[in-house]
């Protein structure tokens, strides 16, 4: 259960940031980058649905684990899909962002350093951690024959 809670904590942190920005908060907003901030303008409230989806994706697996995985084939399958997506998204973007920041990759047209730092060092590693913790929780909660 500890791994499911760790996964949920990572997801809740992601969700909390989205709720904060949607509500007009500016803490760590710079980590999104100028392009995203400018494209949303005064419509950051549009992050509310994103925040709700993240929150549900974070807490539903814990609830399912507590309930001993009702509809295990579907519920565990969806959680596995989520874990794989989080691991791939977080892992690939953390690696790519790190490569850009290290000067290994030089994007055509340049890049927003603040956004790259935010994604390579904070948001994408948090996605990766979320996915890895969820995967371990799923592995440790499987039924043994």
Image: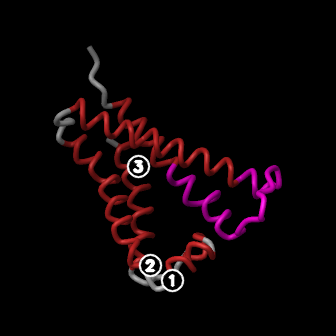
**Overall secondary structure of the magenta section:** helix
Are there few (<14), some (14-19), or many (20+) residues within 10 Å of tag 2? Answer: many
Check the picture and name the quadrant holding the N terminus. top left
**Whole-percent x, y for residue 132 in the image:** 48, 41
Give the structural element (helix, strand or loop) at label 1.
loop
Residue range corresponding to the magenta coloring: 98-127
Closer to the camera: disc 2 or disc 3? Answer: 2
- According to the picture, the residue beneath numbered tag 1 turns out to be 41
Give the structural element (helix, strand or loop) at label 2.
helix
User: N-terminal of the two: label 2 or label 3?
Assistant: 3
Q: Is residue 106 magenta?
A: yes
| Pointers 1 and 2 in contact (C-beta within 8 Å) | yes
Closer to the camera: disc 3 or disc 1? Answer: 1
Above or below, comparing residue 49 to residue 77 in the picture: below
How far, Cα to Cα, is label 2 from label 3?
28 Å
**Whole-percent x, y for residue 17 in the image:** 45, 70
- According to the picture, the residue beneath numbered tag 3 turns out to be 6
Q: What label does residue 92 carry, if any?
A: none
Above or below, comparing residue 1 to residue 28 in the picture: above
Which residue is at 26% across, 13% downward? Answer: 145
User: N-terminal of the two: label 3 or label 1?
Assistant: 3
| Pointers 3 and 1 in contact (C-beta within 8 Å) | no
Which residue is at 55% across, 49% downward? Answer: 90
Q: Is residue 97 left or right of residue 26?
A: right
Between 35 and 130, the one lying in front of the other is: 35
Above or below, comparing residue 118 to residue 30 in the picture: above
How far, Cα to Cα, is label 3 from label 1?
33 Å
Q: Quadrant of residue 68?
A: top left
- According to the picture, the residue beneath numbered tag 2 turns out to be 44
Q: Quadrant of residue 37?
A: bottom right
Q: Is residue 64 left or right of residue 123?
A: left
């Amino acid at each position: 259960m500890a791994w499911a809670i760790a996964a949920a904590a990572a997801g809740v942190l992601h969700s909390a940031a989205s709720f904060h920005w949607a509500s007009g908060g500016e803490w760590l907003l710079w980590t999104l980058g100028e392009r995203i901030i400018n494209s949303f303008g005064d419509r950051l409230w549009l992050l509310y649905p994103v925040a709700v989806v993240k929150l549900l994706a974070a807490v539903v697996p814990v609830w399912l684990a507590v309930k001993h995985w009702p509809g295990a084939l579907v519920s565990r399958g969806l959680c596995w899909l989520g874990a794989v997506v989080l691991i791939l998204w977080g892992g690939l973007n953390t690696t790519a962002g790190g490569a850009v920041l290290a000067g290994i990759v030089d994007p055509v047209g340049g890049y927003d350093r603040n956004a790259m730092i935010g994604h390579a060092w904070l948001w994408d590693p948090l996605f990766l951690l979320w996915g890895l913790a969820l995967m371990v929780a799923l592995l440790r909660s499987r039924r043994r024959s």
